Image: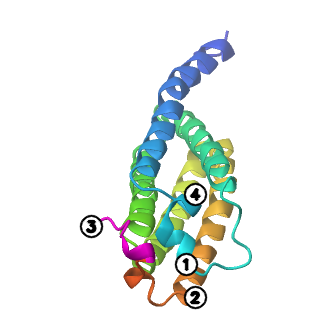
Amino acid sequence: MNQIASRAQLRAGFLRWAIVTVPLVLLLGLAAGSLVSAGSDNAWYAALAKPSFTPPDWAFPVAWTLIYVLLGVALAMVLDARGATGRGPAVAAFAVQLVLNLAWMPLFFGAHRVSAALVLILVLLALVLLTTWLFARIRPRAALLFAPYIAWLALATALTWQIDRLNPDAEALVPGGGSAQMTL
């Protein structure tokens, strides 16, 4: 026998990581999303001028659920690559991009800081591309799982840029006399 571990043992190691990482990433995304109301449930957002390519409200939770599951699986694949060169920096980059990802929603929907959210998402997109590259050096299939995330972030970046452009006074917009604004 020339193998150190059987395929079943390798698969079991990955599954142990996935049982932790997938729910963890999903729960963190859910927690960030529950901090503020989003979509048409947010009076401030509903009052904004939006570009014609804005997806329907139902698409956002569906897309993010899928993305968070894929990110959890990708992270499990890299964590399971014990001894792989670059594993530590790849996991660190993943953690930083996830923190930035989770900060975007409260910044945009809660604090109504569209310009700051645009800067944040541009930094996030660059960091996600770096993380994808780092993951590809360890597990190419893990990097492929980032493709929907990159596509969705590209769309979200375009949406944020257009909303910023169409609503130069977005931070001051307080619909209905009340404020759904969150202070940072």
Q: Percent x, y for residue 70? A: 62, 42
The three-letter code of the residue at mark 3 reads Thr
Residue indicated by mark 2: 166
Label 4 – label 3 distance at C-alpha = 35 Å
Q: Are marks 3 and 1 in contact (CB under 8 Å)?
A: no
Label 2 – label 1 distance at C-alpha = 8 Å
Label 4 – label 1 distance at C-alpha = 36 Å
Q: Residue at x 66, y 13 (%)?
A: 8
Q: Residue at x 60, y 13 (%)?
A: 9
Residue sitting nearer the eye, 9 or 104? 104
Please state which of the two labelled residues, at mark 4 or mark 1, is closer to the viewer: 1
Q: Residues within 10 Å of mark 1 (few under 14, many from 20)?
A: some
Q: Are marks 4 and 1 in contact (CB under 8 Å)?
A: no
Label 4 – label 2 distance at C-alpha = 34 Å
Instruction: Looking at the image, tell me whether mark 2 or mark 3 is earlier in sequence order.
Output: 2
Does 30 lie within the magenta span?
no
Please state which of the two labelled residues, at mark 3 or mark 1, is closer to the viewer: 1
Q: Residues within 10 Å of mark 4 (few under 14, many from 20)?
A: some
Q: Which residues are magenta?
A: 175-184
Q: Residue at x 43, y 45 (%)?
A: 91
Residue sitting nearer the eye, 147 or 84? 147
Residue indicated by mark 4: 133
The three-letter code of the residue at mark 2 reads Leu
Instruction: Looking at the image, tell me whether mark 4 or mark 2 is earlier in sequence order.
Output: 4
Residue sitting nearer the eye, 156 or 91? 156
